[in-house]
Image: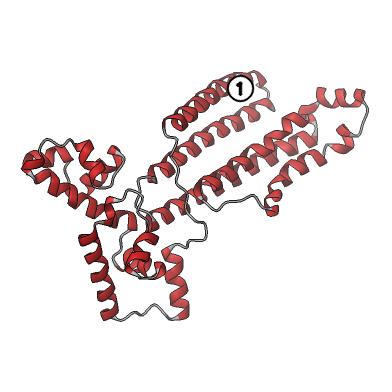
Amino acid sequence: MLRGLFAFLQIPVFYLYVLSVCYSDFKLKPKHLLHLLPFVIANAILIPRFYAVDDTSKINFIKGYQKMIEIQFNHILIHVQLIVYIIAVFMVLRKAKKLYLENCAGTSISSYNWLFQFTVVLTILYSGALLKNIFKFSDYPYISEWIKIGLLVFQLLIVCWYLFKALNNPGLFRSIDSKLKLVSDIVLEEKNKEQLAVSEKEYNEELLKLQHYMVEEKPFLNPSLTIQDVSATIEIPVRDLSLLINHKLEQHFYDFVNTYRIEEAMEILKDTTKSKMTVLEILYEVGFNSKSSFNTAFKKHTGDTPTVYRKSA
């Protein structure tokens, strides 16, 4: 019984895992013990009629488990817990991806896309488990057994997929600082403080300074460039730089930097003296380290693939 109730710890552990992947400063804290609450409640209600009775009473309890109010309550509780945590995981991923786009320009955005896919797959798995439990307490318990077999096979495939991804992409994840704020939140704070009004002259000066730095120094060639790196070099506070790019220019930092990378790639593709350079060599040259992210960004910017653009240039 106790072993079965450890299922209450699976989804909270996954939630904490997602937090640890998304945020570089994640640490387990005493407040995280609250995630044990459903597990404790599920066990506590079994004390009077199961844990605290003799073996005969335990056996009778197990024989009639489908009718036992404690078991029915625990099944409802675990399904409510599942729904709440799945929603929470998607919210964490949504915020983390947005923070990454606003502050980083590496290709690790694929990490969040993959983790999102992994969460969707787990949601399907848990939904299947929910369906299994519905049939388990119905007049068709044999259907529950067939679903159980299917879930075991599906679970094996998920584990293999996860291991394959981890082994082939050991540096898949690059976390961000959880203390970073979304630009939308910064703008709201500024409006509340009535400090958002920046002079047009100051705005133009900062923009020219940023553009000059990007063109002359070409920091975008660094595949791991962050907004903090740019801020430290051109001496514009991260908060102001973030507002300038994400709010004033209405571009994520990720897209802003990739625009310069693509422009650089276009120059190389048009250069007849570099016609022997492959697309793979070019994407590494301009700061990308993923062919898929390069092709996506290039087509978004030009409307063509790199190969087609080179032929028409």
Colour scheme shown: secondary structure
User: Where residue 310 sits: x, y (%)?
Assistant: 11, 40
**250 vs 126: above or below:** below
Residue type indicated by callout 1: Lys
- The image quadrant that residue 61 belongs to is top right
Left or right: 27, with 54 as reference point: left
The answer to whether residue 107 is left or right of residue 295 is right
Instruction: Tell me where residue 87 appears, x and y as whole percent.
Output: 55, 47
**Nearer to me, 229 or 38:** 229
Camera-nearest residue between 99 and 157: 99
Query: Which residue in the structure is indicated by mark 1?
Result: 148
What residue lies at 27% left-to-right and 66% top-to-bottom?
A: 210
The quadrant holding residue 75 is top right
Q: Mark 1: which secondary structure?
A: helix
Q: Which one is in front, 134 or 105?
A: 105
Label 1 neighbour load within 10 Å: few <14, some 14-19, many 20+: some
Q: Residue reaching furthest right?
A: 54
Pick the residue in front: 53 or 112: 112
Quarter of the picture containing the N terminus is: top right
The answer to which quarter of the image holds residue 168 is top left
**Percent x, y for residue 144?**
63, 22
Is 71 drawn above or below residue 191 in the view shown?
Answer: above
Q: Position of residue 275 (x, y in %)?
A: 10, 38
Q: Residue at x 64, y 18 (%)?
A: 142
> Is the residue 194 above or below the residue 215 in the image?
below
Residue in view at x 52 percent, y 24 percent: 154
Quarter of the image for the C terminus: give it: top left
Total labels: the figure holds 1
Residue at image position (42%, 70%) is: 187
